[in-house]
Image: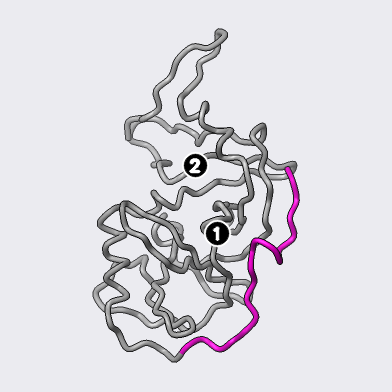
Amino acid sequence: MESSQSARRENGALVTDRAQGMPRLAGKYLTFKLARESYGMAIQHVRELIRLVEITRVPGTKDFIRGVINLRGKVIPVIDPRVKFRMGELKATDQTVIIVVQCQIRGHELTLGMLVDEVLEVLTITAENLEPPPDFGTGAIDTDYLLGVGKTDKKVILLMDLAKVLSAEEAEAVEKAVEPEIVSPPAPETPSADPRGDLPCSET
């Protein structure tokens, strides 16, 4: 993949347009685990966190679409980001969580669930602790779905751009997955968390 970043010299240093845009990304992020890596998503896209419930498979859908769930009478598609990013299918544990997000992806307004290995915490990431996504060069790993990299004392957090997680074709496939289907009964009213208030927050 050819790098899409344009660059210019500023005070003798090479500065990319992406780097110039880092300050606007400062804010609160819900952090979570996918395999061994820590990721974050902007908290404003997160609607709720729910424990893993039965997911109804939808025949003929793409492999990263795990199926649909009935959330208080509304059918919600659920995707497995680990499959999408070729990390291997998620194996459910008692820490597995479905993050319900609402965002616009490639012109499609979607509400969907994202399976993650574990939800960590809400972090406030300041501008000085943000860097552009790594550029691996032509034909290497695609980092288009990353907003940037947040730094903490102990680790780095890959900040996910939900608007670019799926292609237009994939977003359309997710929409079609919720066309009338027979799904499991609504998930029981088990405690869920509002990540904007219930999870511990810290500033990096």
Which residue range is magenta in the image? 186-204
The answer to the question of whether label 2 and label 1 lie on touching residues, with beta carbons closer than 8 A, is no
Which residue does the image show at 55% across and 55% down from the upper left?
44
Query: Closer to the camera: disc 2 or disc 1?
Result: 2
Please tell me which residue lies in front, 110 or 96. Answer: 110
Horizontal side, residue 81 vs residue 191: left or right: left
Label 2: state its secondary structure.
strand
- Find residue 177 and report its horizontal and vertical position in percent: 30, 73
Q: Amino acid at mark 1?
A: Ala
Front in this rendered view, residue 16 or 84: 16
Horizontal side of 191 relative to 115 (left or right) equals right
Which residue does the image show at 41% across and 89% down from the upper left?
184
Question: What is the CA distance from the residue labelled 2 to the residue labelled 1?
Answer: 19 Å
Query: Residue 92: horizontal and vertical position, in percent?
Result: 54, 75
**Image quarter (top left, top right, bottom left or bottom right) of the C terminus:** top right
Q: Position of residue 63 (x, y in %)?
A: 33, 67
Query: Disc 2 designates what residue?
Result: 147
Tell me the crowding category of disc 2: few under 14, some 14 to 19, or many 20 or more residues within 10 angstroms, Cα based. many
Q: Residue at x 57, y 66 (%)?
A: 117
Q: Which residue is mark 1?
A: 35
Q: Quadrant of the N terminus?
A: top left
| Magenta stretch contains residue 187 | yes
Position of 103 relative to 95 (above/below): above
For badge 2, the amino acid type reads Leu
Residue found farthest to the bottom = 185
Q: Main secondary structure of the magenta part?
A: loop
27 lies above or below 108: above
Residue at the outermost top position: 12
